[in-house]
Structures are given as structure tokens and as C-alpha cells.
Image (cartoon, grey):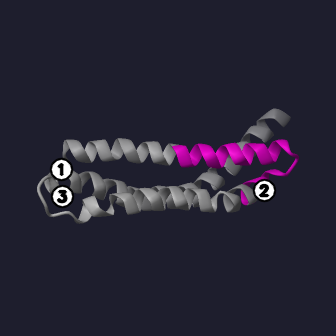
Amino acid sequence: MPFSISAGIGFIALAGIAVLNGVVMVTFINQLREEGLSLHEATLQGAMARLRPVLMTAAVAGIGFMPMALSHSAGAEVQRPLATVVIGGLITATALTLLILPTLYAWFEREKATEIEV
């Protein structure tokens, strides 16, 4: 599928959803850290507690764009690239948010703690 303006708009929408999910995850992990949990416990509990909201955000957007992705009627040449980008990107962004983001958070926080101690 060639890149088009509607696909570019899809990337913008996808970036918004991915950032929203990341902010929700990091905010909750920071809240757990303020309550006194260790870095490892806060990261693990934050990822597990925010699993449902992140999956629901992706599922709602994915299901909402499904008719556009499968459309063959008038205007489908504009709708299909947008929907395809969003649905495909949501799968990747959700996996990255749930697996990579907590790992990177723990890694950067551990490095920050060792810099403060030195």
C-alpha cells in the first residue's frame, strides 16, 4: 500500500494513542514509587495494573477502525490507508508499551539512582 496523506494522518493518530498509553503507564509507576514500593515492585505492579487500560485503548481504536480497513465502497482509497496504519501500529505500540516501556523505565531509573549515589 503506498504512503499517502491519510496514512500520514494515521501515523499522527497512532502516535497520540501510543503517547497516551505511555503516560498512563509511567504516571502509575511513579505513583507506586511515591507510595514506597521498590523500583522492581512498582514497575511490575504498574505494568500488570495498567494491562487492561492499555489493551482496552488499543482494542477500542482497532475495532473502531476495522470497518474502514475492510471497506470497498466509495472513499475506501482514502479510508483504508489510515485504518491500516492505525490497526497495524496499535499492535506494535501496545506490545512496546506493555513490555519495553516498563523495562526502559526501570533501566533509566536505576541509572539515575546510581548517578545520585556517586
- Residue 95 position (above or below residue 33): below
Percent of width and height locating residue 5? 21, 41
Residue 53 appears in the rendering = yes
Disc 2, SS: helix
* Mark with earlier residue (3, 1): 3
Residue at 27% in and 51% down: 82
Q: Residue at x 69, y 62 (%)?
A: 48
- Residue ID at (65%, 54%): 102
The C terminus lies in quadrant: top right
Q: Quadrant of residue 77?
A: bottom left
Q: Residue shown at 71%/47% (left/top)?
A: 28
In x, y percent, where is residue 86? 35, 54
Three-letter amino acid code of the residue under disc 2? His
Provide the secondary structure element on which disc 1 rests. Answer: helix
Which residue is identified by label 2?
40
Q: Which residues are magenta?
A: 20-44
The CA distance from mark 2 to mark 3 is 42 Å
Q: CA distance from mark 1 to mark 2?
A: 45 Å
What is the x, y in percent for residue 43? 73, 54
Q: Which mark is residue 78?
A: 1
Residue placed under numbered mark 3 in the picture:
1
* First in sequence: mark 2 vs mark 3: 3
Horizontal and vertical percent position of residue 18: 49, 48
Q: Amino acid at mark 1?
A: Val
